[in-house]
Amino acid sequence: MLIISATATLFIVIATALPLLKHTHWLVRGMDFPRLQIASIAMGVLIVEFIFLDLQRPITGLLIATTALCFFWQLWWILPYTLIWPKEVKATNALDPNSQLSVITANVLKTNRNSDALIDIVAAYKPDILVTLESDTWWQNRLKVLEADMPYSVKCPLDNLYGMHVYSRLPFSEEKISYLVEKDIPSIHLALELRTGDKVRMHFVHPAPPSPTENAESTERDAELITIARSIAETAQAVIVTGDLNDVAWSATTRLFRKISGLLDPRVGRGMFNTFHAAYPFLRWPLDHIFHSSHFTVKNIQRLPSMGSDHFPLFTLLVFNPAVEGSQKGLTANHVDHAQAKTVSEEKGARKQDVPTPNK
């Protein structure tokens, strides 16, 4: 049992220590994802060590202390996405429909052919905005039925798992499809007009992940996200960023994105809303995100039922309320963060000036 416990503790230590290396290799950055799972395993190992090992032996004390340290370190990253943490975005029960904006973010999985499930979800929740990721020409043709109720759209069908479509009940302008870092990885940018007449700058993103089958390192993903954040930092207008970031909410990159952009995360204090992987309950983490400026409060955020994809859709109902802007604060950046963000962008030749700035 001592050998088994020591082996398990060594695994936990390695998994915990790898992200501290700050290396961009996919194996290192991949350890940002399963912090909840690693914490769960560490808790299980701690229980085993307390029950089955001789607590009088120094080696047992060392194993318990090491495992406990890893457990609390992992917990530090994920606790903001639990109900015990203070909410970053204020809740609201505002009834005025003109000030509300609802968004469904859905990675459909290109090979998934259950389009009726997504169409039924849209019919049930009636979002103002639907953004689909991994949508190709087949999906574009199947979702054409949505255009009767959502007549405004931007379409970028691709066969490389990075197609993207935006459907809207509300009018928008200055729409643009950009390839900020990689020539085959698009993002969509537009100025949405709310029912109140106010304009919202929206960015829809789906950067490629660091993985053995995609990019060997996270530099491309990080550069796209951070470059958009640097552009957003220069505006005082209402902003929303949503999509499949191929990164978890608690990673160092996502935290840097929030610091630089100044955007808020409505999940903080409400839950993780793990959207991937739909088929494996124990291997789930939040890959699909929505961030917004402090012009908004949140009325509802929820993970929607499965639609046959490896992702669950994410539904968010925001309320435009500029009066609360000064009372909502997220993470703040210091000079080190700004220097790091500039380095991340420049490493891939990405410029914040290349990010479309609708309604600037």
Image: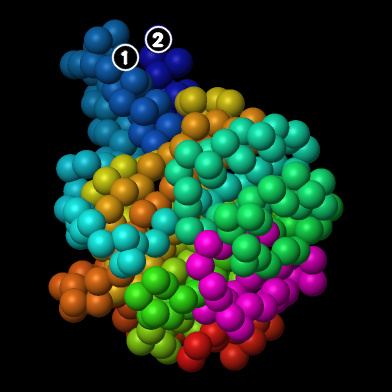
Quarter location, residue 57 = top left
Q: Nearer the viewer, residue 55 or 138?
A: 138
Whichever of labels 1 and 2 marks the residue nearer the N terminus, that label is 2
Residue 25 visible in the picture: no
Residue type marked 2: Met
Q: Position of residue 143 (x, y in %)?
A: 70, 48
Q: Amino acid at mark 1?
A: Val
> Image point 58% across, 47% down: which residue?
106
User: Residue 74: x percent and y percent?
Assistant: 34, 43
Over which residues does the magenta segment extend? 165-191
Magenta residue check for 174: yes
Q: Residue at x 74, y 57 (%)?
A: 163
**Residue in view at x 35 percent, y 87 percent:** 236
Q: Is residue 210 above or below residue 171?
A: above
Q: Secondary structure at mark 2?
A: loop
Disc 1 from disc 2: Cα separation: 9 Å
Q: Residue at x 40, y 52 (%)?
A: 316
| Disc 1 to disc 2: CB gap under 8 Å | yes
- Which residue is label 2 attached to? 1
What's the mark number on residue 48?
1
